[in-house]
């Protein structure tokens, strides 16, 4: 009798196991749409599943659940040989859909086959962060059912298309001459495949000369694009930013030959680093990494930034992020004269030459201190504050000899200065950092420069003055006929206080790494949040500090 009972129990258990297998196979073939038809509000709740089905992930079957904000998968618990359920619960995993930038149908194709192929499932491409660096990562959801994959693909695609900040069409500018002339290859190898993966359309212009990008931006139809991208160094980025802002003023009918309040650029700007310093890219990405820059664009991470305008004699010369006068300008001017030498050696030689012939500039420096009410100010309040510039409002004036004067609207993070050339300003605090380095010995000036790459405060010298300002006016003054070239006449008036005055009546300015010759007084103003860059606010660059071999 007992043998019959045991045999009957074994038959029942076998039937139960077969029934479970059939249910799992049925669920494997057709996804479960949970609560969509019964309750239309279920889709609005992130906790209510839209779909549920079985996929293989890493060669193991998983119960996968999709909501409007997350996809979750849990390993299917194996059956106990005795027919009893296991007490141990297996841990699952999940991905927030805001971190997914592409979904593709996965197929196996033979060599040379461009379409069709054996269906394997669907693949999610996600953006993973490690420190400041972003990387793409693929998650494969394997299932051989075409109907099953089609339903999941459609739902996932609809959710991703709902992220409004993510661009769909880009105007791309590539400077093939940037740094080591690697910009085009950087774009083709590392950036373009990611844009294609994210189904982003691109229109590429490879610039042929300085000012080419500005010319294109002034004439092309920007309505066809929802973002602009620049592949190059700081000079290339500054040119594209200037072109975007100049186009915005033209469309708004602003007179650039007067003191005016500029309007915001119509499109955001993405920066792919391919230069020697890449201070703009580091300031919004925290690292010089083309893939990180591309993923910030794809994911739609946007950051409003302040921009400077440089004017002379009432005429707008340039929109920019940083301005240097004195040592910074003279070094760049010397480098431009050595154009036949490779870029890195040219800059180092110019740096050494400028240090060897280090002389101060005799000038009158005036500024309007920033109120510090950065982010909370309205546009009208900002316009009232900047109207003081036109009315000759509360200027503070310094007259004397300066080795270098820097004005920056962003921190300018880079490998030479991981904390930034101007660490006491932010990307959008409605002010500029003014760093005025007064006359000092060559050794003291070198100590000041060395501290940019260290944790020691580079501004703790008696001859260095820092201010947060909203406007700067700089007027060079003729004091002694010192020129860039060393000569017997120069040696006659040689002294530590003998300033450099150009024999041609113009002065070199370093504007975002580009040389600009200006004959007289220059006015620099800050314009809060008139440009949007793809990236985030960064405190410090995650770049390995590099010290200049020259010093």
Image: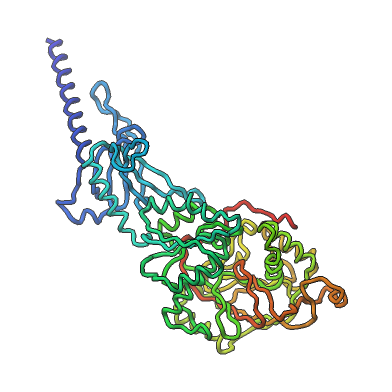
Residue situated in front as seen by the camera: 89 or 142: 142
Q: Image height check: is 548 above or below 220?
A: above
Residue 371 locus on image (x, y percent):
55, 78
**Residue 373: image location, x then y, percent:** 51, 75
Which residue is rendered at x = 37% and y = 50% of the image?
Answer: 100
Compared to 415, does 395 lie above or below?
A: below
Q: Residue furthest bottom?
A: 391
The image quadrant that residue 350 belongs to is: bottom right
Res 506 quadrant in image: bottom right
Q: Nearer the viewer, residue 343 or 19?
A: 343
Residue pictured at 18% horizontal, 51% vertical: 36
- Can residue 436 be seen by looking at this rendering? no
User: Would residue 496 appear left or right of 47 to someone viewing this image?
Assistant: right
Left or right, residue 106 beside residue 403: left
Q: Residue at x 40, y 56 (%)?
A: 299
The answer to whether residue 68 of the structure is visible from this angle is yes
**Is residue 454 left or right of 427 when viewed as pictured?**
right
């Amino acid at each position: 009798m007992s043998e019959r009972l045991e045999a009957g129990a074994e038959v029942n258990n076998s039937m139960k196991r077969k029934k479970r297998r059939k249910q799992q196979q049925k669920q494997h073939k057709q996804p479960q749409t949970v609560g969509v038809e019964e309750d239309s509000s279920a889709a609005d709740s992130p906790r209510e599943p839209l779909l549920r089905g079985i996929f293989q992930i890493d060669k193991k079957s998983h119960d996968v659940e999709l909501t409007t904000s997350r996809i979750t998968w849990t390993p299917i618990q194996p059956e106990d040989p005795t027919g009893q359920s296991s007490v141990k619960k297996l841990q699952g995993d999940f991905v927030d859909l805001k971190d997914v930038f592409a979904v593709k149908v996965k197929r196996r194709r033979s060599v040379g086959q461009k379409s069709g192929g054996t269906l394997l499932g669907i693949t999610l491409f996600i953006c993973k962060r490690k420190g400041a660096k972003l990387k793409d990562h693929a998650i494969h959801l394997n299932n051989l059912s075409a109907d099953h994959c089609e339903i999941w693909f459609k739902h996932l695609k609809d959710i991703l298309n709902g992220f409004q900040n993510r661009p769909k069409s880009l105007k791309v500018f590539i400077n093939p001459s940037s740094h080591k002339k690697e910009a085009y290859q950087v774009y083709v190898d590392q950036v373009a495949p990611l844009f294609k993966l994210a189904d982003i359309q691109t229109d590429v212009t490879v610039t042929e000369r300085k000012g080419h990008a500005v010319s294109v931006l002034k004439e092309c139809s920007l309505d066809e694009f929802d973002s602009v991208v620049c592949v190059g160094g700081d000079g290339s980025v500054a040119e594209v930013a200037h072109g975007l802002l100049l186009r915005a003023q033209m469309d708004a009918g602003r007179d650039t030959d007067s003191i005016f309040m500029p309007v915001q650029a119509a499109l955001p700007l993405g920066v792919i680093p391919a230069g020697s310093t890449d201070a703009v890219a580091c300031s919004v990405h925290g690292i010089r990494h083309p893939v990180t820059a591309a993923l910030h664009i794809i994911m739609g991470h946007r950051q409003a930034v302040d921009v400077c305008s440089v004017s002379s004699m009432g005429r707008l010369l340039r929109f920019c992020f940083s301005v240097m006068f004195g040592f910074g300008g003279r070094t760049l001017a010397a480098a431009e004269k050595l154009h036949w030498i490779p870029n890195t050696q040219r800059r180092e030689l110019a740096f050494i030459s400028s240090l060897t012939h280090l002389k101060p500039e005799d000038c009158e420096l005036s500024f309007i201190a920033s109120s510090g009410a950065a982010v909370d100010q309205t546009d009208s309040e900002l316009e009232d504050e900047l109207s003081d510039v036109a009315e000759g409002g509360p200027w503070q004036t310094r007259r004397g000899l300066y080795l270098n004067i820097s004005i920056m609207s962003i921190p300018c993070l880079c490998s030479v200065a991981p904390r930034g050339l101007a660490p006491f300003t932010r990307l959008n605090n409605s002010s500029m950092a003014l760093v005025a380095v007064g006359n000092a010995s060559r050794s003291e000036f070198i100590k000041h420069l060395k501290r940019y790459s260290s944790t020691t405060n580079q501004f703790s010298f008696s001859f260095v003055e820092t201010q947060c300002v909203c406007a700067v006016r700089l007027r060079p003054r003729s004091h002694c006929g010192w020129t860039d070239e060393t000569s017997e006449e120069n040696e006659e008036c040689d002294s530590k206080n003998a300033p450099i005055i150009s024999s041609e009546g113009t002065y070199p300015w370093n504007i975002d790494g580009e040389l600009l010759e200006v004959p007289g007084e220059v006015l620099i103003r800050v314009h809060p949040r008139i440009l949007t860059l793809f990236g985030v606010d960064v405190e410090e660059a995650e770049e390995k500090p590099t010290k200049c071999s020259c010093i």
